[in-house]
Image (tube, rainbow, N blue to C red):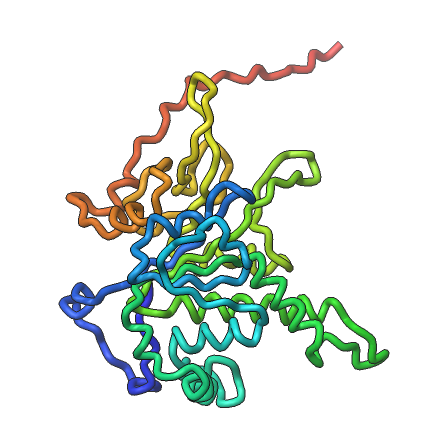
Amino acid sequence: MSAPFDQQSAGRLRIITADERMAERRGIKGVLAGASGIGKTSQLWSLDPTTTLFVNLEAGELAVQGWPGDEVRVRDWELARDIACWIGGPNPAMREDQSYSAAHFARVCDAFGSPAQLAKYQTIFVDSLTVASRLCLQHCKGQPQAMSDRSGKADLRGAYGLLGQEMIGWVTHLQHVPDKNLWLVGILDRKLDDFSRPFFALQVEGAKTGLELPGVVDELITLAELRTEAGEPYRAFICTTLNPFGFPAKDRSGRLATIEEPHLGRLMDKIRRPTATHPTANFQVALPTPEAAIPIPTTTTQEG
């Protein structure tokens, strides 16, 4: 959860009092990951259509055909970046020639209109990170950083380096929207490491985004298929880092159980719900009782 960018206080120190901080409405920023076809986009049906904006990069809205909410369709990286600036506002740390600067914000406001029209939306649902990374990579391949100074030929190392900067900058800017929920949908792949051990990773271009993204957002939720003791399959949200399934997950709120009902709307209600105990109480767990020490026999050398 985050505080808004504020141009008025750039370069100045302002202490936010406890009462002001507690009175702020803070949005939930999260990633919803899962295998292809598991039903990630269909989670739109669990959200209020009157207060949700669907940012559609994937052209996969067949699953939500008939969903009565507003939608923005994005087909190139420049538009994705402009929408992020329009939603998130200007970042005073950026120079005038950089993305998300005051100049960039003024330009997109001239093109899209006043950001006041976004006030009706409480949740931004972006589908998907996977496609966003592909659009970003296509954009990066055409930039000067992706060309070798010596040979003048394409340099993929430069393109992927720029890709990581662009994607993390985009996600970070959206993450700083103070009063709106943000959910980024991503496909989850099952892979094998060098020792043939399975692990799960987000399907995004380049390594930097997948590695750094969990540290940027508040929640990382995996929509997974589990099975009952009788072997019957069911879907559920995996919400905590320590889980027996090996799925990537994270809960910064401290209010979620390892397995939750696969309903995004009710999940956000639970995150906001006040608790009787402080979230850190969940960390006060007893360590397992160590087994009795087994004495190690010593070997003596007998002189002959």
The N terminus sits in image quarter: bottom left
Query: In the visual, does 150 lie left or right of 10?
Result: right
Query: In the visual, does 126 lie left or right of 165?
Result: left
| Residue nearest the viewer, comparing 272 with 80 | 80
> Which residue occupies the extreme right position in the image?
151
The C terminus sits in image quarter: top right
Question: Which quarter of the figure has residue 256?
Answer: top left
> Residue 94, how many percent across, how many down?
47, 83
Query: In the visual, does 231 lie left or right of 205?
Result: left
> Residue 289, how many percent across, how many down?
36, 23
Residue 42 drawn above or below residue 105: above
Residue at x 39%, y 42% (from the top left corner) = 239
Picture mark count: 0
Residue at x 46%, y 60% (from the top left corner) = 126
Residue at x 45%, y 57% (from the top left corner) = 184
Residue 303 drawn above or below residue 4: above
> Residue 195, how many percent across, how many down?
69, 35
| Residue nearest the viewer, comparing 146 with 60 | 60
Residue at x 32%, y 81% (from the top left corner) = 6
| Residue nearest the viewer, comparing 245 with 301 | 245
Residue 46 drawn above or below residue 148: above
Residue 111 drawn above or below residue 205: below
> Which residue occupies the extreme front position in the image?
66
| Residue nearest the viewer, comparing 65 with 91 | 65
> Residue 51, how many percent across, how many down?
29, 62
